Amino acid sequence: MFGSLKKKLKESIRVFSRKVEQAPEEVVDAPKDEEIPKVVPDSGKKVEKVSIIRRVKKRVVEKKLSASDLESIFKPLELSLLESGVAFEVIARVRKELESQMVNKPIKRGKTESIVNKALENAFVSVLMRPEVPSFKKKPTVIMFVGVNGAGKTTSLAKFCNWLKKRKKSCVLAASDTFRAASIEQLEKHAAKLGVRVIKHDYGSDAAAVAYDAVEHARSKGIDVVLIDTAGRSHADVNLMDELKKIKRVAKPDYIFFVGDALVGNDAVEQAESFNEAVGIDFSMLAKADVDQKGGAILSVAYVTKKPILFLGTGQGYDDLEVFDKDKILKRIF
Amino acid sequence: MVLDRLGDSLKTSIKKLLGSALVDEKLVEEIIKDIQRALIQADVDVKLVYKLSNSIRKEIKGAKKGFSKKEQVVEVVYNSLVRLVGTKGVKIQPKGKGFTILLVGLFGSGKTTTAAKLAKFYMKRGYRVALLGLDTFRPAAMEQLEQLGMSINATVFVKKGEKKADKVVKEFAKELKKFDIVIADSAGRDALDKELVKEIKGVNKMLNPQETLLVMPADIGQNAKAQAQAFSDALKVSGVVVTRMDGTAKGGGALTSCAVTRTPVKLIGVGEKVEDIEEFEPKRFISRLLGMGDLETLLERAKESFDEEKAEDLAKKMVSGKFNLIDLREQLEGVSKMGSLSKLTSMIPGFGTAKLPKGALEVQEEKLKMFKIVMDSMTKEELERPEIINSVRIERIAGGSGTTVKDVKELLTQYRQMRKLMKGMSSGKMKKFMKQFGIKDMRDLERLM
């Protein structure tokens, strides 16, 4: 999925580095004594290194990049990130990262490419957290699934239920999507295949009440995990978002999973932000990651929610659920 | 919101251009840059954006001779964008019996909901419509279509338990011919998946639809291009349906799809209810894409909801100051017929990006509802002559309508303010006010109110 981003990034990094290398060289004096940052006493080794440099006082050939240099060089990079569907705000962060690491800092000849790589990796690493999978020790652990229409909540929930079952956790599903036609039947079909129970009311009934009943059911039967399937909703609809808050108040979920669509573009920021503001997201799952060739939404969602991505949906089968592996993703990019 | 900010920036540079004495190259470049940003943020394919902005630049520079009017620059920009989605809103015109519309698209793009919306849309226009369920994969997809069909009284053909979509087509082929329009709902798919493409090709061949509509959600990002291309390679796509236009996404992916499939957007989905579908108007779409107001739609909606005669009558009363609660109620009813307030304001130029606190419109909407309830508990006399409403009456009205004294008083205050405003408006202030909102004459205002 990150194939094209990887290719483009490589390309622009190369162009970027070449431009930096071609920038007019500037002969500068090695840093004077007072400019050398003070080293914390307990890292004695570094002090020694600095003092060696000081003694040598060699004139070195270095380059310095001004902010406007970076601006013009950053363009192709920005373009490739945009083409990969990374949201504007994430790109701004990458730019800042590069600025702080490169502008007005001496850059050694031949080192540009690795410095850029490092800076980029840093920018992404800081938004991609390593997920800590919940322990499910609390009985029952209640998890609520939220997201916009058609993101893939119900399918993701079924996959997650399958994942839990394989880890010997018992589940019950709450059919709290009481709005969409046949949503309850859809959940029931999944439940029948997975061999778990669904707690349901009628269509049009109170979603919070369904969730409450499911939690009570789990409590009385000693079930490990309750998975609440809520109706897809437009994050721009205040009433629907209020309803979601109500379900949260009543069901008191331990975790809220945001199911995002990996194919969404810039709106990913708006969507994730709205849900995060309304109910607070603990983890994200991104569905349709197998269809996504770009990977931009993954970075955008992680950036906006500042919460780990737990899973990627990677196909139509129950087993097509990939535990999000930051290192794997980063490796695919860089 | 990010996008609103961008719309603002574009508006600012256009305003700057209109305010400056000369068409200056720097300003043109500024506008082009703003357009690029707005479009990329709206998820239009990046390459397409650059292609587009280059052609805008060329056209402006080429037309330099005799380019006295700054307005023309704006027009060039506008027209170039409209051209992208097709210069004319193309409508689907069903003819004869068994006119078949096949809906295809990605997972979760909104095909099934769109199928039901389309069915309702045509049933309202007097056609006999059948819904055909070909999503044999997703659990309960058949039940969903069935339930939606039931809610709108449409005939639905589904075969539960069948795994092959083409078998479903075969089974119902004869019966489907009896209907004016057949709307076929296919399974969601990744168009780059060979197996899934093979299936839809087979179905398409058997069904031989007059229209194959690609359903694209408004929020799809840069993946839109590859998907649209793949669908277009596999099938003869005849148009695009943009769904979820009620969210914050601007539909740039849909724009890309149009460019790739070389077909126009034909319909847009604007909400989760079955009636939330609109025929596509390119100019309106572009206005929204850029975050600029859309007066055209507003006027049209207002026209639909209001009886012309009543409106004229009302306007006369308003200006003369003879404006009672009955008129106010009619007005409120008219407004609610026009749609939600937030939808309405997004169409008024200058209002689309107004800095309203989040939720303010919803509060206002709730209030309008409450006002109507209060008025339902008033006597005819009280409605006609609100000045007779004293504290005893207020208490009775509050009790009868299940509201509070405060609510009733609030309504009366609003009414009085409005009447005052109307009186004041009959003078020169009115013209100024109307100009501010881009309203040309009284007739326009009547429609708006």
Image: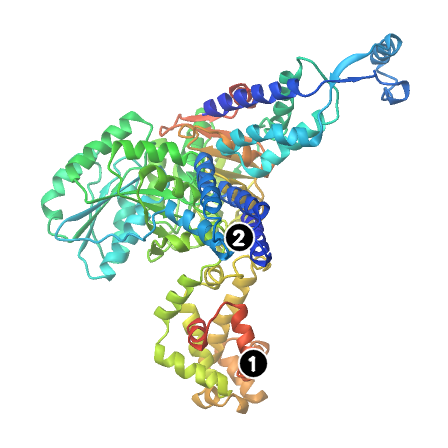
Give me the chain letter of mark 1: B
Q: Looking at this view, name the residue that lies furthest to the front.
A: B65
Q: Return the x and y of residue B361 as percentages of the image width and height.
A: 53, 63
The x, y position of residue A229, in whole percent, is 44, 42
Q: Would residue A253 be visible to someone looking at this image? A: yes
Location of residue B241 in the rendering, given as x and y in whole percent from the top left corner: 33, 46
User: Looking at numbered disc 2 in the image, what kind of residue is underneath it?
Assistant: Lys
Q: Is residue B424 left or right of residue A164?
A: right
Mark 1 lies on a secondary structure that is helix
Locate residue B418: give its quadrant.
Answer: bottom right
* In the foreground, A181 or B362: B362
Would you name the residue on which mark 1 appears?
A: B428
On screen, residue A259 above or below A9: below
* Residue visible at 83% across and 13% down in the picture: A46
In the displayed structure, B429 sits above or below B171; it is below
Placement of A35 over or under B202, stated as above or below: above
Image spot of residue A7 (x, y percent) = 49, 21
Q: Residue type at mark 1?
A: Gly
